[in-house]
Amino acid sequence: MNERLRNAFNGITPISCDRELYETTLKKAAAIREAGGNKRPRVSKPFAALCSAVIVLVIGTVSIGAAYYRGLGMVLSPWLGNQDKLHEVMSEVSTANVKSSFENLDINVCGGLTDGTINIVFLDITRTDGGAFDMSDQKIEFKDGNIFNEKCVSPKAAFDKLICVHEMELVDENVYSNRIVYAQQYFIEDDDPVDDKLTIAIAWIKNKDSHSEGVEISVSDLMLTKTAVDYEYFENTDIKSDQPYEKFSGSYSAAINMDKIAAKVKTLSTNEIIKLNFNNYDIADMTRNYDIDFTLDSISVSPMTVSFKAHREKIDEFQYMTLYESIGYVTLKDGSSIAIASINDKPCFNNQTGNGGHAVGGAVYEAPVLYERWNIDCSFMLEEAVKLDDVVSVTIGETTIDLADASK
Amino acid sequence: MDNLRFGKLISSLHGTVYRVAYSYTRNHADAEEITQEAFLKLYLCQKEFPSDMDAKAWLIRVTINLSVSLLRSGWRKKREELPEIEIPSPEQENEDLRELINKLTPEQMTAVYLHYYESYSLKEIASMCGTTVASVSMRLARARARLKSLLTEDEDNE
């Protein structure tokens, strides 16, 4: 397949030749310099100006058991909880600390949810001066000095965690309401221990000139799944690095289900041995594949998410690994299969702190490290929305769990 | 950037930049325009590239940004497309697969091209596309699934 793909792409060739391109470029460059320097019309200010895009998140309504939120006219989900707390949180997000530090960016709070302990605030982020969406180099800088983009910490001013939903991630930009939105998740990187009292902001990002109508979501379909990595402390035996290790815990992802699917969960226990394949990343970006046996402790399936816990006693080689790509699939009643895909680029377990398993300080961990027990606690999103009732089995690695049998 | 080095970069990267642009625009004229613009930016930029690989990664990123800008421009949405000039291909099989590849989304096609043709890692592709490794992984998974499904359909229809 790779060879065929290469050959297919070989057929996409430029119309002009290299020489033409070279000469045309030089002519244009000369003309620009003659006209007054190397100035190109810019629609945005330099990097510091940031070109985040518009996030339009229109909260859908839930008709059953809901209450109105004053001021915004939002209908809250079964998450009725502490509205005062939510109001307070939303007020914090709307403060000048968030909005005024940035000239070309407009941030508005367009809704929120709370269950009393976990607060979710929906942000509408608009780039006001046009231009292409590009978060790779751009930063949103907040008054308290916190900076965020995809690679940086989330702003601590008002919320603990920022989840950005990018328009570009969607398959069909004209059909938002029927698509699952993949939320990028960010780990909390401050020093405070993570507890259940979190404020999470979900931001929809797109360009100001996008023709998208925005997104309607059903509040009742908003789910939070905890994808915590729980692993044992260990001593650093790598003589190349003196980085400290910390127990990693407490990251949350939010899945926004565009379809109105009831959030039911089936939880099963099993002692099946599952073989999982891992990619091994080191600082030089060399990948190696490992097949490792784990004992499957439990597996649960809900619309859009498959979660499982597994463990392995005493692994004797480890750098840091990413459980990658498709790890399995669910089989539906009609016989079709839907893949389970990773929803984040963070490893399920690693030997480093914080930021996504990248080598801290650039060290390459080559020394073998012994563990007593290696736990996995992972959740993955399904690539397409499914109804739980239609799922008949789940396959993780090489193990298939028949939901009908297991639930008896 | 000196002209000699620039010329060499054109020789080695013209096709790459063009294919990335085409992945988004699916139109030879637009792809040419974006390619031209990208190389012009390279020539005029003040950036020092330690290696040609760095220049390549930078160029690809710029090309993606330019492509996205063009796709989103109001002008492009309003204009009417002229019929594409068919460039005959000597190998029907490659052309067939190319047609299928054209059915991928721009993001998927770009990810497939950068990964399978240019042999970039997922991390490198994520950096160039301004997204995360998970997104790139997802795009590739979906692209593979889509191609597989289209290929199967094709075989069934034969």
Image (spheres, coloured by chain):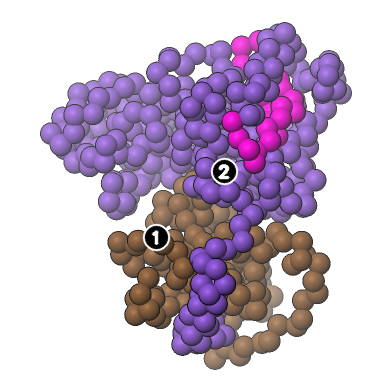
Chain colours: A purple, B brown
Q: Is A111 in the magenta?
A: yes
Specify whether A238 is left or right of A21.
left
Specify whether A62 is left or right of A288.
right
User: In terms of depth relative to the viewer, which is nearer, A240 or A350?
Assistant: A240
Q: Is A359 in the magenta?
A: no
Percent position of residue A4, x then y: 48, 75
- Considering only vertical position in the picture, is B40 above or below A403? below
User: In terms of depth relative to the viewer, which is nearer, A44 or A244?
Assistant: A44
Helix, strand or loop for disc 2: helix
Q: Amino acid at mark 1?
A: Lys
Report the residue marked by disc 2. A49
Callout 2: chain: A
Q: Residue at x 63, y 29 (%)?
A: A100
Q: Residue at x 43, y 14 (%)?
A: A193
Classed neighbour count for the residue bearing mark 2: other residues with Cα under 10 Å, few (<14), some (14–19), many (≥20):
some
Report the residue marked by disc 1. B47
Percent position of residue A23, x then y: 48, 85
Q: Where the C terminus of chain A falls, by quadrant?
A: top right
Tally of numbered discs: 2
Q: Are marks 2 and 1 in contact (CB under 8 Å)?
A: no
Q: Which residues are magenta?
A: A101-124
Percent position of residue B66, x then y: 59, 63
- Which image quadrant is residue A162 in? top right
* Residue A5 seen from this side: no
* Residue A162 seen from this side: yes
Q: Amino acid at mark 2?
A: Ala
Callout 1: chain: B
Specify whether B2 is left or right of A125.
left
Q: Main secondary structure of the magenta part?
A: strand
